Each structure stands twice: as C-alpha cells, then as structure tokens.
Amino acid sequence: MRDVRVRFAPSPTGPLHIGGVRTALYNYLFARKMGGKFILRIEDTDQGRFVPGAEQYIIDSLDWCGITFDEGVHVGGPHSPYRQSERKELYHQYADQLVKSGHAYYAFDSTEELDELRKEYESRKQTFQYGPATRLGLRNSLTLPVEKVQEMLDSGVHYVIRIRIPENEVIHVNDLIRGLVSVESSLLDDKVLYKSDGMPTYHLANVVDDYLMEISHVIRGEEWLPSAPLHVLLYRYLGWESVMPQFAHLPLLLKPDGNGKLSKRDGDRLGFPVFPLKWVDPKSGEVSSGYRESGYLPDAFMNMLALLGWHLDSDKELFSMNELVEAFSIDRCSKSGAKFDPEKAKWFNHHYLSAKPIKELASYLKTQIEGKNIEASEEYLEQVCSLVHERVVLIPDLYEQSHFFFHAPETYDEKVVAKVWKTDTPSLLLELIKVLQSIEPFMLVNLESGIKQFVQDKEIGMGQLMNPLRLCVVGTSAGPGMMDMMAVIGRQEIISRINLCIIKLNQ
C-alpha cells in the first residue's frame, strides 16, 4: 500500500478563512489516522495577489489550532523548498515537456486582443472560451509557422503556455466523497500553465509539486472540483497517471441561512469572526476579528469545525483531538454544504470553557483584571471562577460575569429597584448588618444558618431579604448564589455595599 502523504497548500493572499482551517484539519486528521505525513506548502505563484504577513498569519493560525506538520515551509523536510516561488526554476522543464509532446502550446495573444474577443462574443450573447472551438483561429503555435514561433520566442515576445484540451472526450475523476465525476472536454478551456515571466500558474505548479512531493491524497474544498479534470489530464500527459493522488473534494461551508458560501467578506458583517486570529489588513488598516481574540478556545474551535461536513452515525458531538483522529474517515464526509451556526460555536466553547480547571480559568481572569489595574490574590480569583465558570461562554465573559466581585456597583438597575426596594427595605437591611457582624467565622455554612434564622425571626420570605441584598451587592438581579458571593467578597465589603446602596437610593 502506498504511504499516505497529504498537504495543505494555501495561498498567502490574505487571512486564512475558517473554511481553509477545516480543510487543514481534515488533512491533519486523515494523516494521523493513517500514520502518514502532513505537509504545509505555500502556493504563492500569483505574485500580484501576494499580501505581506499572510504566510506568517497562516502558520500562526494553524499553530493556535493545534494542527502540526511533518514537513513544510516553516519546519523543512526532504522535499524543500516548500514555497512555490522558490521552486519556479523546476516548472519550466515540465511545461516544455508538455509542449514537445503536443499536449500544450505557445499562445501569443495579447490581453487587449482577448478582451476584444470577449466583448465581441458578449455582443452576440455568447461566452468566449479559449479552447478546442476557438484556438485554431488565434495567435499560437498551433496556427503560426514553426519558424515564426521560434522567432517570437527568441525576440522575447510575451507568451503563455496553454494546455491543449482534447476534443470530444469525457474525462473521469474518481472522488472519494462524490464518487465518479464525468466531465465533457468541450466544457473545459485551454488553461494557462506557464507564463513568459517564468512563473507557473496554480494548475501546473500544483500538479508538479504533488507529484514530486509524493502526495497520495488531495483533500481540498469543493471549489476546486471544476479544476480536477484538468489536473487528471496533466497527470496523464506528464506520464504520472499511475501515481496520481486520490481526490476528495470537501463540501462548502455555507452562511448561517444556507444561502451561499461563507466568504472572507462575511467577517464581522454577520456578527461573528470568519478568521481564526485577528487580522489587520496591511494596506487599508482594516481590522477583522478572530476566534482567539474573541475568547474561543482552540480545542472548542476545532471540535466545532470538525463537525461541519463530517459526522458519525451516533449523536456524539464532543471530541478531543485524539478522539477525532481515531474516528475520522473520508467516507463519512458529506457531499452537501454545511451551514455554519455561530450559536453552536458558542455552545461548544461554553462546554470547553466551563470544563477547564479552575486554576486555568483564574489565570485567564487574572489577565483581564490586570488590564483594568485591579489586583486580587490567586486564591480569590479561584473562588470567583468556581462560582461563575458555568455561566461563561467566551473567555471575556469571566470578567463580565464577575466584575462585581472586584468593585461595588456605581449604579443600580432601575427596573430591579422598582420591583424589590420597598419602604421598609432600608431598616430590614440595617438589621441584617447586625446579624452579619455577629457571624463568626464569616463563611458559607454560618451565613446560611444565620440568615435563615434571621428570616424566620422576621417572619418574611427569603426573597424579601435576598433580592434587595443582591441589588446592593451586584447592582442588578444577576449573579451566582447570594450567600456564595457574600462568603467570597467578605463581611466588611458586603456591609459597605449595603450602606452605600441605602444612601444612594434614599437620596
């Protein structure tokens, strides 16, 4: 059996979309499941679209996600270099080989000439396609004398090398997800493979590199399925058909309403990130949010992405990375697009965050309060986190759900005041202060018994006391159990907040 070798081959044209992260994840899971190798290759042949910083962003994003590589642009390996712009010298020989075998040809048509042809076709409500039906009427080595072609090449006239798509042939692609895909060659155009500036196009470089790097399986997005017949032809024409990789085209990642592909342009517009990390556009300075900076955990993010296009027969939804590796198989990938659900992403993060060790949550909270110039002991932070951890969805929620543990409220919710603050409330709370001063030691079990006794003696309902007390301590009706909070915040601060609230609300 052939050794499994898969690759993730992004282009550094901007930030890495979560659809690309999912493709990387599925390649990673497949490689680890099959005991194979996983390679990161940077496909930067389109220098016109190159964006500074994008390559490092891709590497940093995958590192945050916990996706590791055996070979690649940042780790090296036996097939270096792994950046296509550093491999451009080797592509020319394969382009020449295709020309010599008659499977490709030189085309000298200018951009202006082709634009005029397109306009002419559009005027007739037709679409121009450079291919079997039109190539014999254009300026290329199929129509020009051999001497003229050589003269133009020698004089440095701009040219491209195009593949010669066969006429009247059905091209078959065996896809591990979609089965047999058959395409009429008349639907394909003679794609450009190589340009006179010495750079190959994606199609040639992709196939050559996959062959030289001994890639066994090409697992990529559905948007590349229309290119698969062309790639099959290139493997055949280059004499590599017997070692051609197996193809698997993953389903699209769709917008939450299912109406179209989730795109990079949807970032923040729809109210959630579409990039793993924050991205600052080097040209415009525009900032796009990232899952890391929004407070998502990488293991929750990976678990969520894994289930967008892949599933088991069971209802199991929570997987560690090791469990995903063990369970993953290509044949469980869906053919149809997967709708992205931002609320489900939050559900996963809530589960993973609330299950984190309290010490780890306390370290997150410590970072947040330090940014607000608040000081607290590790013990105090752990006590706070133990009370709020089940309420948090994103990491910033740790402070949002616990800010009242660090400072007294400055305002009081007017609706809550109108509901719970009665004429006799101040006197009731002043009596409670005397009870709180007598409780020794000031801890949860003693608070529970002391306050319970106070309520019984006053012959009132627990809510009649605890609701206004919560208003004093928190400023609203939110928060964990009242007595739990009191035990953590401490006697003097609780009493201070009660007195402050009485003064402010009686003004």
Image: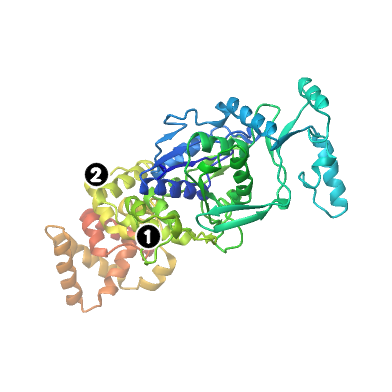
Q: Say what secondary structure mark 2 lies in.
A: loop
Q: Are there few (<14), some (14-19), or many (20+) residues within 10 Å of tag 2?
A: few
Q: Are there few (<14), some (14-19), or many (20+) residues within 10 Å of tag 1?
A: few
Q: Say what secondary structure mark 1 lies in.
A: helix
Lower sequence index among marks 2 and 1: 2
User: The C terminus is located in which quarter?
Assistant: bottom left
Q: Check disc 2 and give the amino acid type.
A: Ser
Left or right: residue 431 compared with residue 160:
left
Q: CA distance from mark 2 to mark 1?
A: 30 Å
Q: Quadrant of residue 162?
A: top right
Q: Quadrant of residue 271?
A: bottom right
User: The N terminus is located in which quarter?
Assistant: top left
Q: Residue furthest bottom?
A: 459
Q: Which residue is mark 1?
A: 504
Residue at (21%, 58%) from the top-left corner?
487
Q: Check disc 1 and give the amino acid type.
A: Lys
Label annotation for residue 377: 2
Label annotation for residue 181: none
Q: Are marks 2 and 1 in contact (CB under 8 Å)?
A: no
* Total number of numbered discs in the rendering: 2
Left or right: residue 492 compared with residue 277:
left
Image position, residue 323 (x, y; %): 33, 54
Residue at (24%, 59%) from the top-left corner?
486
Would residue 440 be seen by someone viewing this image from the given angle?
Answer: yes
Left or right: residue 52 compared with residue 404:
right
